[in-house]
Amino acid sequence: MAFASRLASKSKQLCSSQVILQRQHAISVRFFANEAAPQALKGDEMLKNIFLDVKKKFETALGVLRKEKITIAPEDPAAVSQYANVMKTVREKADLFSESQRIAYTIETRTAGIPDARTYLLTLKEIRERRGLIDEHGAEAMMMDALEKVEKEIKKPLMRNDKKGMALLTAELGIRKEDLPKYEEQLELKIAKAQLEELKKDALEAMETQKKREEFKDEEMVEVKSLDVRNFL
């Protein structure tokens, strides 16, 4: 079915982007290392290695998806949690970044040269919007309010290298380092729910298209959550 093909296609796109991202990240680390730069690969050899790496990761991802049951029910918290766990297994076995890790990498690269906290927070908002994430709890407004309060207290714009000022901002926001894994898990669940909603939409569109065909016009559409994606991979 069309939605299963899209699932496989998205898995391949994810693997491709992950391999390229990880290679770029590794190259940047090596570039600043003290050791001598690694011998450059010829263009065709590098492309071949990337292709083989993507192929291996894609096959690994499909192997997991063929074994694990996915219930396409974004309205069911248990189904969302199960889907998130399946995708976590895919990432672990195929050696891929999690969505939160990819976002963290994007934030790191996009904000590396930003000196002040205000521009930094505005850039975070832009990254969130581009990724289609919803600020359900108004966190951005709370962060800006906290920044306003801190800047009023220190009587100047807050710079990111101002350790004392940044500590004030962190305290004002009530952020604790030990809570970060919980926030990461919540983000992964939100992303899992959004992906399930997209899969459900794709499945409904595929079934509607099939129902228009003469040989299926008298058949009733099954519930999306009863479908077993493994049968279409």
Image: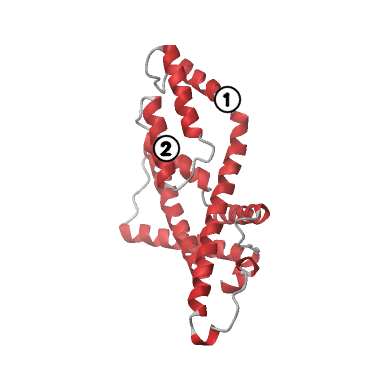
34, 128: nearer the viewer? 128
Element type where label 2 sits in the image: helix
Q: Residue at x 50, y 61 (%)?
A: 11
Q: Quadrant of residue 180?
A: top right
Which residue bears the numbered disc 2?
A: 125
Q: Quadrant of the C terminus?
A: bottom right
Q: Quadrant of residue 187?
A: top right
Q: Could you tell whether 86 is left or right of 40 in the image?
A: right
Q: Amino acid at mark 2?
A: Lys
**Residue 64 visible (yes or no):** yes
Locate residue 14, reporting x and y percent: 47, 57
174, 208: nearer the viewer? 208
Q: Distance between the Cα atoms at labels 1 and 2?
A: 19 Å
Element type where label 1 sits in the image: loop
> How many labels sit on residues?
2
Color scheme of the displayed model: secondary structure
Q: Is residue 211 above or below residue 116?
A: below
Disc nearer the start of the sequence (1/2): 2
Locate residue 27, reporting x and y percent: 39, 44
Locate residue 190, reporting x and y percent: 56, 48
The residue at the far bottom in this view is 215
Which residue bears the numbered disc 1?
A: 174
Q: Residue at x 62, y 60 (%)?
A: 73
Q: Residue at x 47, y 40 (%)?
A: 104
User: 10 Å neighbourhood of mark 1: few (<14), some, or many (≥20)?
Assistant: few
89, 82: nearer the viewer? 82
50, 185: nearer the viewer? 185
